[in-house]
Image (tube, rainbow, N blue to C red):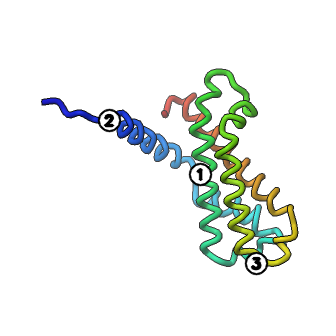
Amino acid sequence: MAVITSFDIKKREKQIKYERAVLKEISIKELKEKVARYFGSSNLTSSVLMNEGIEEACYDVAIEAFLLGANYSKFSEYGEDIQAIKNRCKEEDNHLKETLYHFLLYWGSEESNKNESLYYLCEQFVDEWWLEGVQKANKRRKLRLH
């Protein structure tokens, strides 16, 4: 008798395997440094980052942005430029930015509620991790590590 499996299950297993392989490219030290660089030096968020839960939320968003970039990097094989690839995942990208922004607003101080530069910090943070995911995945693909 043959075992009948669903394509959805196989697709999900393949995606998990790929994500695990790509996540080996991120170092915890690099995560901590970038979170400190973006949010630790700002007057708006430096007091908030003392809370460990908020720092972990930044890590989660960074990892999600990295994986999003890695997953969409396959389109660069077909000759699409970075901006075209970015437009493909615009909805997910905006969701990550707004999630981080609203999370920091919720746990932030009163002055962070009045300043829109916090959104730009979140936007730059997510964009940098997304781009790094694309670059690392392209590098893995060129080295045939996929």
Question: What amino acid type is highlighted by mark number 1?
Answer: Glu
Residue with the mark numbered 1 = 64
Q: Is 60 above or below relative to 46?
A: above
Which residue is farthest left?
1
Q: Quadrant of the N terminus?
A: top left
Q: CA distance from mark 3 to mark 2?
A: 49 Å
Residue 130 appears in which quarter of the rendering?
top right
**Which residue does the image show at 55% across and 35% down from the upper left?**
140
Q: Which residue is mark 2?
A: 6
Residue at image x 72%, y 68%? 104
Residue 124, x across and y down, in percent: 77, 52
Residue 145, position as x, y percentages in the image: 49, 33
Query: For the view shown, which residue lies furthest in the top direction?
Result: 78
Callout 1 secondary element: helix
In the image, 142 versus 127, the foreground residue is 127
Answer few, some or many: residues within 10 Å of disc 3's Cα (few below 14, many 20 plus, some between 14 and 19): some
Q: Is residue 93 above or below residue 78?
A: below
Residue 7 image-quadrant placement: top left
Q: Identify the residue at image location x=69%, y=33%.
A: 85
Quadrant position of residue 50: bottom right
Mark 3 touching mark 2, by CB under 8 A? no
| Kind of residue at badge 3 | Ser
Q: Which residue is mark 3?
A: 47
Question: Closer to the N terminus: mark 1 or mark 3?
Answer: 3
Label 2 is placed on what type of residue? Ser
Q: Is residue 26 left or right of residue 86?
A: left
Under circle 3, the secondary element is loop
**Helix, strand or loop under label 2:** loop
Q: Residues within 10 Å of mark 1 (few under 14, many from 20)?
A: some
* Mark closer to the chain start, 3 or 2: 2
Asked whether the beta carbons under mark 1 and mark 3 sit within 8 Å of each other, the answer is no
